[in-house]
Amino acid sequence: DTLKSLYIKTAQKLKGSDRRQFMAEVVKGLGIGGQTLAEREFDTVETVLHFAETLTFKGQRPVVTLVETVYKIGVKLIQQAMA
């Protein structure tokens, strides 16, 4: 719990790409299943999506949507398929 609160406090102090990079490194550091564990720690997928919506890049907020489709490794999508 102490480490979790440290991660949360640190993420809240960071902005933009530094914040995203920090969060990615934390998830990567959690190892296999890290993304799932991070989602669980954030309580719900909705909480994670809301958090992602609050991030900014060059003053702009991202368009955040949940993609539940599972693709085979190595499959590349064209831009229209991602829209």
Image (cartoon, rainbow, N blue to C red):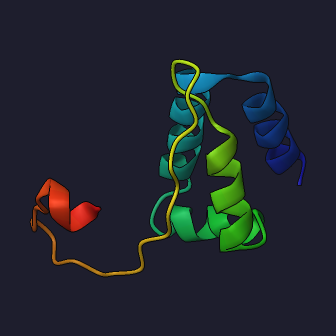
Q: Nearer the viewer, residue 7 or 19?
A: 19
65 lies above or below 14: below
> Residue 67 at x, y = what percent?
41, 72
Left/right of residue 6 with respect to residue 30 in the rendered view: right
> Residue 72 at x, y = what percent?
16, 78
Q: Quadrant of residue 80?
A: bottom left
Quadrant occupied by the N terminus: bottom right
Q: Nearer the viewer, residue 8 or 58?
A: 58
Q: Quadrant of residue 75?
A: bottom left
Count of number-bearing discs? 0
Q: What residue do we see at 79% from left, 32% from top?
A: 12
> Residue 81 at x, y = what percent?
19, 67
> Residue 6 at x, y = what percent?
83, 37
Q: Nearer the viewer, residue 53 or 75?
A: 53
Q: What residue do we see at 51% from left, 42% from top?
A: 24
Left/right of residue 40 with respect to residue 12 in the rendered view: left
62 lies above or below 15: below
Q: What residue do we see at 22% from left, 77% from top?
A: 71
Which residue in the rendered view is the most extreme toward the top? 58
Quadrant occupied by the C terminus: bottom left
Q: Nearer the viewer, residue 38 or 1?
A: 38
57 lies above or below 3: above
59 lies above or below 53: above
